[in-house]
Amino acid sequence: MRKHIPDYLLVTDAGPVVVDVKPLHRLSRPEVAFTFGWTREAVEVRRWKYEVWSEPPAAELENVRFLSGYRRDWPFDRELVDELRGAELDGVSLRRAAASLPDRPEEQVRSAIYHLLWTGEFTGGLDWPFSPAHVLRRTA
């Protein structure tokens, strides 16, 4: 008799997804590997999807932690944020974007860009530490 309660059941348009969450360093333990293998079989026989999630790579986690400091919108000048929303910044480096509004201090512009990255209005590779060379992409 086996017993295991997965961490999440996601109901998606493509069907149910069962998710177990475990730190990466524990996935190689024999008892964890056995339990997750058994769970995968039990889930997939029902034609559901099974996933195991772990912590993101260190650089991605640090970038998300960094951007979380820019999550609140009240510290940012609304006019500045709106100017950035209207600016042609798709494919522009963070360095060039921060200098794109010459009438504004670069530090304020860069901070507002970080806020827009947090809100998802822009994306920029989170898988390596932020630098002035990061390229911004507009989201749909």
Image (cartoon, rainbow, N blue to C red):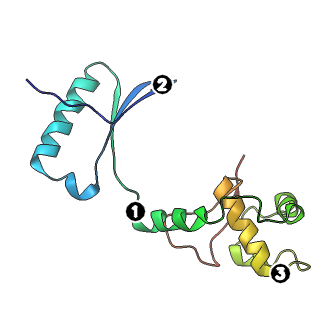
**Element under label 2?**
loop
Foreground residue, 125 or 23? 23
Quadrant location of the N terminus in the rendered image: top left
Residue assigned mark 3? 105
Check disc 1 and give the amino acid type: Pro
- Does any portion of residue 97 appear in the rendered image? no
Residue assigned mark 1? 57
**Element under label 1?**
loop
Q: Which of marks 1 and 2 precedes in the sequence?
A: 2
Asked whether, in this view, residue 20 is left or right of residue 113, the answer is left
Decide: marks 2, 1 in contact (CB < 8 A)?
no
Asked whether, in this view, residue 126 is left or right of residue 39, the answer is right
The x, y position of residue 113, in whole percent, is: 73, 66
Q: Residues within 10 Å of mark 2 (few under 14, many from 20)?
A: few
Judged from this view, the residue extending furthest toward the front is: 74
Q: Which of marks 3 and 1 precedes in the sequence?
A: 1
Say which of marks 1 and 3 sits in front: 3
Tell me the CA gap for discs 2 and 1.
27 Å
Foreground residue, 91 or 120? 120
Check disc 2 and give the amino acid type: Ala
Tell me the CA gap for discs 3 and 2.
47 Å
Tell me the CA gap for discs 1 and 3.
33 Å
Q: Residues within 10 Å of mark 1 (few under 14, many from 20)?
A: few
Asked whether, in this view, residue 20 is left or right of residue 111, the answer is left
Foreground residue, 83 or 140? 83
Judged from this view, the residue extending furthest toward the left is: 1
Asked whether, in this view, residue 96 is left or right of residue 47, the answer is right
Q: Which mark is residue 14?
A: 2
Q: Residue at x 72, y 71 (%)?
A: 111
Looking at the rendering, which quadrant does residue 49 occupy?
top left
